[in-house]
């Protein structure tokens, strides 16, 4: 078989014949060329497609096989060519809408092809031996020759203001040409406009349902409903707040006015040392450390992890050291001082309590001291080398701080 070209069948109409044994409808198209005396046929059952192409010699050989050599004698030269031309024209006339009504159709077994059929009338007999073209080519041919033309025809029928069946042929040709030109330029838009019309879409839906034995076919509607494309509201689950983890340290509360007043009063009565002095634990020694000559007292700064405010961290109050008296030197005064010191809030719970430096009261001067002793004592105090009477413990420098 020669190469099959479906382009030659684009201008041909679909012909229909039914197999009486299986009640299967078959659609086919036929084409012949008077130039080279070739012919071809395409057959489909809307699922598969078969085709056959015959040259001039193949056509003459099959015609003689189907009709007998008596009715088709062997000729020479131009007579043979003229005879082949007359037989092809007769076969072409039979493959028309009017000629199919006079032909009988029957599916036969094929020894040379995939699908064979026989056509017969009073004048002649004919047999086609077709070959399956494949599923991919079948789908392409059906889409191009059958599906797209049907979509355009339905679009014309449902969009025309007048009944298409009542139009004269000339007016119908103009309407068809207009629809076909628009569809050829933009196929996607044409298909969308044709199948998006509610009347046509719902009509095809109902036809499909009835054709496939659906008990309750859907109704045909002419209007389009606009649904609300919003998700359904779902109850939002309540999210429990995570419980705060218990910290290992206690945060220092922010000081209020009453606490600030008590702290300020305690600061006036108690002098905090800049650095701790070593504590003598010997039982027989009652002496005190060397007194500090600094006039200002610097409060200790809290650590980085303390909960104190920024104002307390920058607190630096210069205070004048009170003149020690005999009452301060007594144990009762020192006990009261220690109690007032313990009443102050600590910066952090983890920092140790710094010891309070004990200052020894100066011995009061007598009126009987001589003028020389007074000058000497004043000079020693000015130079910082004055020493109090009595034994003192040695001062340890560079001790470890708390």
Image (cartoon, grey):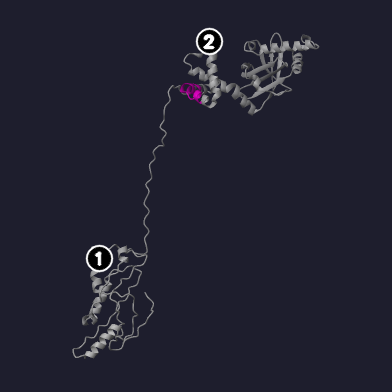
Which residue shows up at 38% across the image and 53% down it? Answer: 242
Q: Quadrant of the N terminus?
A: top right
Q: Residues within 10 Å of mark 2 (few under 14, many from 20)?
A: few
Quadrant in the rendering for residue 297: bottom left
Q: Is residue 37 left or right of residue 223?
A: right
x and y percentages locating residue 176 in the rendered image: 54, 17
Indicate which disc residue 260 carries.
1
Question: Which residue is tagged 2?
Answer: 168
Quadrant in the rendering for residue 288: bottom left
Q: Nearer the viewer, residue 368 or 302?
A: 368
Which circle's residue, 2 or 1, is located before the other in the chain? 2
Q: Quadrant of the C terminus?
A: bottom left
Q: Residues within 10 Å of mark 1 (few under 14, many from 20)?
A: few
What are the residue bounds of the magenta stretch? 192-205
x and y percentages locating residue 270 in the rendered image: 25, 74
Indicate which disc residue 155 carries.
none
Q: Is residue 189 above or below residue 355?
A: above
Q: Is residue 202 within the magenta segment? A: yes
């Amino acid at each position: 078989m020669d190469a099959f070209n479906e382009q030659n069948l684009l201008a041909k109409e679909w012909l229909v014949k039914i197999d009486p044994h299986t009640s299967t409808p078959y659609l086919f198209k036929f084409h012949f060329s008077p130039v080279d005396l070739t012919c071809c046929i395409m057959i489909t059952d809307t699922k598969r497609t078969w085709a056959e192409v015959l040259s001039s010699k193949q056509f003459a050989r099959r015609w003689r096989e189907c009709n007998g050599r008596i009715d088709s004698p062997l000729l020479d030269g131009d007579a043979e060519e003229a005879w082949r031309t007359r037989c092809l024209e007769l076969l072409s006339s039979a493959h028309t809408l009017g000629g199919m009504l006079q032909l009988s159709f029957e599916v036969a077994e094929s020894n040379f092809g995939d699908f064979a059929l026989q056509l017969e009338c009073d004048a002649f007999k004919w047999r086609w031996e077709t070959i399956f073209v494949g599923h991919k080519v079948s789908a392409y041919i059906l889409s191009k020759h059958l599906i797209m033309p049907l979509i355009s025809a339905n679009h014309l029928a449902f969009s025309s203001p007048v009944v298409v069946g009542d139009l004269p042929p000339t007016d119908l040709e103009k309407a068809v040409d207009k629809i076909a030109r628009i569809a050829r330029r933009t196929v996607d838009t044409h298909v969308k406009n044709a199948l998006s019309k509610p009347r046509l879409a719902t009509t095809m839906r109902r036809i499909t349902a009835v054709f496939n034995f659906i008990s309750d076919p859907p109704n045909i509607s002419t209007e389009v409903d606009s649904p609300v494309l919003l998700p359904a509201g779902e109850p939002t689950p309540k999210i429990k707040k995570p419980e705060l983890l218990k910290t290992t340290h206690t945060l220092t509360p922010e000081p209020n006015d009453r606490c600030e007043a008590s702290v300020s009063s305690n600061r006036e009565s108690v002098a905090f040392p800049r650095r701790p002095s070593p504590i003598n634990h010997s039982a027989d020694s009652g002496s005190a450390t060397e007194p500090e000559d600094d006039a200002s007292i610097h409060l200790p700064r809290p650590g980085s992890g303390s909960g104190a405010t920024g104002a307390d961290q920058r607190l630096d109050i210069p205070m004048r050291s009170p003149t020690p008296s005999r009452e301060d030197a007594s144990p009762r005064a020192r006990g009261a001082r220690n109690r007032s010191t313990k009443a102050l809030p600590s910066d952090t719970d983890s920092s140790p309590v710094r010891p309070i430096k004990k200052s020894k009261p100066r011995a009061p001067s007598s009126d009987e001291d001589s003028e020389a002793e007074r000058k000497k004592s004043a000079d020693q105090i000015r130079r910082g080398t004055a020493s109090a009477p009595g034994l003192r413990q040695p001062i340890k420098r560079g001790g470890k701080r708390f």
